[in-house]
Image (spheres, grey):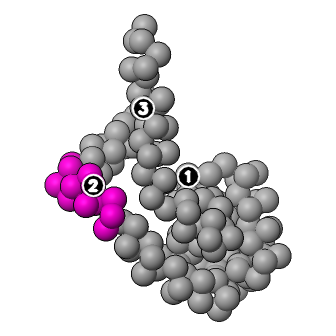
Amino acid sequence: MRKFEDSLPLQLLKARDASMNFFRPLLQENGVTEQQWRILRALHAYDELETKQLAKHCCMLSPSLTGIVNRLEQQGYIQRRKSPEDQRRILLSLTDKARDLFDKMSPDVDARYKAFIDKFGEEKLQQLMTLLTELSELKP
């Protein structure tokens, strides 16, 4: 067995935490959690998604997602509507309030990405993204 410090999941968690340190202060300033921001970004990117689709895009389990979506809806950031094709399907999308928040935060998020790239390097980031994509596509 590998040494504890050499555990791949542990190293991935450490890397995630180090990268999120660039963004956490901005999220906190704007009153959103990491998970909420991930959901808002996904809905901004895809316009409208079913809960299952959103969970997959955000790498969240459905029970966790449900609570976060409920809170975002209560805060006025997410709206639900029934699918015109199938009334059993619920579609989620951003409200104007969420779009305003996204527009307000985007320049600062971009600046944080730039700061991250300045420290880590564009080429290394591209290599890392390629490797992580390959890793995430591995099947047991």
Report if residue 74 lies within the magenta region. Answer: no
Q: In percent of the image, x 59 and y 67: which residue is there?
A: 27
Q: Position of residue 94 (x, y in %)?
A: 64, 82
Which of these two is toward me, 62 or 127? Answer: 127
Amino acid at pointer 1: Cys
The kind of secondary structure element at disc 3 is helix
- For residue 133, side relative to residue 40 (left or right): left
Residues rendered magenta in the picture:
114-127
* Residue that badge 3 annotates: 11
**Disc 1 or disc 3, which is closer to the eye?**
3
Instruction: Check disc 3 and give the amino acid type.
Output: Gln
Question: Does the magenta segment cover residue 123?
Answer: yes
18 w.r.t. 105: above or below: above
Query: Up-down: is 83 above or below 16?
Result: below
Which residue is the extreme one toward the top?
1
- Counting residues from the start of the chain, the first of labels 2 and 1 encountered is 1
Confirm whether residue 39 shows in the render.
no
**Residue that label 2 marks:** 119
Task: Give the mark, 1 or 3, whose residue is nearer the N terminus.
Answer: 3
42 relative to 98, above or below: above
| Quadrant of the frame with the C terminus | top left
Dominant secondary structure, magenta:
helix
- Where 91 falls versus 3 (above or below)? below
Mark 2 residue element? helix
Amino acid type at circle 2 is: Lys
Question: Could you tell me how far apart the alpha carbons at marks 2 and 3 are, in whole angstroms?
Answer: 19 Å
Compute the Cα span from label 2 to label 1: 27 Å
Q: Is residue 4 visible?
A: yes
Q: Residue at x 79, y 68 (%)?
A: 71
- Tell me the SS state at disc 1: loop
> Of tags 2 and 3, which is closer to the observer?
2
